């Protein structure tokens, strides 16, 4: 196949029910756009028939490549693996659950041709999601916009187009606790958005339950902001002033009301419990930053590939070489 103009990257985790329709819709969109393309499906340790379906599609269509992980490494790492393997002049990131419609790719492509290096999809409406998910997502994106050190657009996900030079910068960023939409904003270049309606999931279950959402939010905040650490300084100052004020008030009350006023140990115990809770909370915050440092110093590969299908060259254990760049192996690849 000739060099692709567009590489479409889709992480897959237990999506056997929707994969055939996803492939069909992507193919139809790319046929209408009439450009060279490749679809890179990254199997993130699926436990259903997703891998078999992907391999079957790759065997029938030489546009399709499959990267099969040795185990589940997480959505953001799967996206990273797809970017590592992409050869296109532009790279599209999209989920395989069809909540992000492939038909929006045409609008993104038009903006890229106008000279934009990153085109992110803005969720104008989110169908089929609970009020809790909608409310917490809205609050999260707006809080993130205010406290992070980079301009991360609100109401956006990973669904976006990036030029090859932006993808190349992301390949150089090998941190383990990844927040792709923040990393894409951090690199700069010319960026713009296109609005779309995010559809309800047609089949399967959400891959971001509350626990994973909280972990994802923590990665986003600690990866792009020192705000939690800065809050400690302000809170320490506030508690110090409060302690002085309380001490003065109690002293005055005891002088005017008698030495037994406000006596006993209850007040002391309550204050100690309050201060201890704050201390434990901020020790947790500090621990998160220390854990990130520990992850980076171990320098393990981001992911392990068990097998690949559809790639022109099925080489040994070295990491893919992209756009003339050779780097140390970040991918440990087991032969097919």
Image: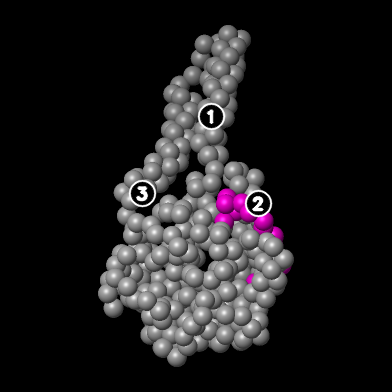
Residue 333 on image: x %, y %: 31, 68
Which colour assignment does the render follow? Answer: one colour
Mark 2 or mark 3: name the one nearer the start of the chain. 2
- Residue nearest the viewer, comparing 301 with 327: 327
Residue at 46% of width from left, 24% of height from top?
268
Mark 1 touching mark 3, by CB under 8 A?
no
Magenta-span inclusion, residue 193 = yes
Looking at this view, name the residue that lies furthest to the bottom: 60
Q: Which residues are magenta?
A: 184-198
Helix or strand or loop: what does disc 3 sit on?
Answer: helix
Q: Quadrant of residue 92?
A: bottom right
> Quarter of the image containing the C terminus?
bottom left
Residue at 55% of width from left, 78% of height from top?
37
Residue 3 on image: x %, y %: 52, 76
Instruction: Please tell me how crowded label 3 is: few (under 14), some (14-19), or many (20+) other residues with Cα within 10 Å.
Output: few
Residue at 47% of width from left, 75% of height from top?
40
Instruction: Please tell me how crowded label 1 is: few (under 14), some (14-19), or many (20+) other residues with Cα within 10 Å.
Output: few
Judge depth for marks 2 and 3 and give the one in front: 3
Return the residue at label 1: 233
In the depicted structure, whether residue 272 falls above or below residue 258: below
Judge depth for marks 1 and 3 and give the one in front: 3
- Residue nearest the viewer, comparing 179 with 270: 179
**Is 316 situated left or right of 1 in this image?**
left
Q: Is residue 226 visible?
A: yes
**Is 310 situated left or right of 92 in this image?**
left
- Residue nearest the viewer, comparing 51 with 215: 51
Q: Is residue 29 visible?
A: no
Instruction: Please tell me how crowded label 2 is: few (under 14), some (14-19), or many (20+) other residues with Cα within 10 Å.
Output: some
Residue 295: assigned label: 3
């Amino acid at each position: 196949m000739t060099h692709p103009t567009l590489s479409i990257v889709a992480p897959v985790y237990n999506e056997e029910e929707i994969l055939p329709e996803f492939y069909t819709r992507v193919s139809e969109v790319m046929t209408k756009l009439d450009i060279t393309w490749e679809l890179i499906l990254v199997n993130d340790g699926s436990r259903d028939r997703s891998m078999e379906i992907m391999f079957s599609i790759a065997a029938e269509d030489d546009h399709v490549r499959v990267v099969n992980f040795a185990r589940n490494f997480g959505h953001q790492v799967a996206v990273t693996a797809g970017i590592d393997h992409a050869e296109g002049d532009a790279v599209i990131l999209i989920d395989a659950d069809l909540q992000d419609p492939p038909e929006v790719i045409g609008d993104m492509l038009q903006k890229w041709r106008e000279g934009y290096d990153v085109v992110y999809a803005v969720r104008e409406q989110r169908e089929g999601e609970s009020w809790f998910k909608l409310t917490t997502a809205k609050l999260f994106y707006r809080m993130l916009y205010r406290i992070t050190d980079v301009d991360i657009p609100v109401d956006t996900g990973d669904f976006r187009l990036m030029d090859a030079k932006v993808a190349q910068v992301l390949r150089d960023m090998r941190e383990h606790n990844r927040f792709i939409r923040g990393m894409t904003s951090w690199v700069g270049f010319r960026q713009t958005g296109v609005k779309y309606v995010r559809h309800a999931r047609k089949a399967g279950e959400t891959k971001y339950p509350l626990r994973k959402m909280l972990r994802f939010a923590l990665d986003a905040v600690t990866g792009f902001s020192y705000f939690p650490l800065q809050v400690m300084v302000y809170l320490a100052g506030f508690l110090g002033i409060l302690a002085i004020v309380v001490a003065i008030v109690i002293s005055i009350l005891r002088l005017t009301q008698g030495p037994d006023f406000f006596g006993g140990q209850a007040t002391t115990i309550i204050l100690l419990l309050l201060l201890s809770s704050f201390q434990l909370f901020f020790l947790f915050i500090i621990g998160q930053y220390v854990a990130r440092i520990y992850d980076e110093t171990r320098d393990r590969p981001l992911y392990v590939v068990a097998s690949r299908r559809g790639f022109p060259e099925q080489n040994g254990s070295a990491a893919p070489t992209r756009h003339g760049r050779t780097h140390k192996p970040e991918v440990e690849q087991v032969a097919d």
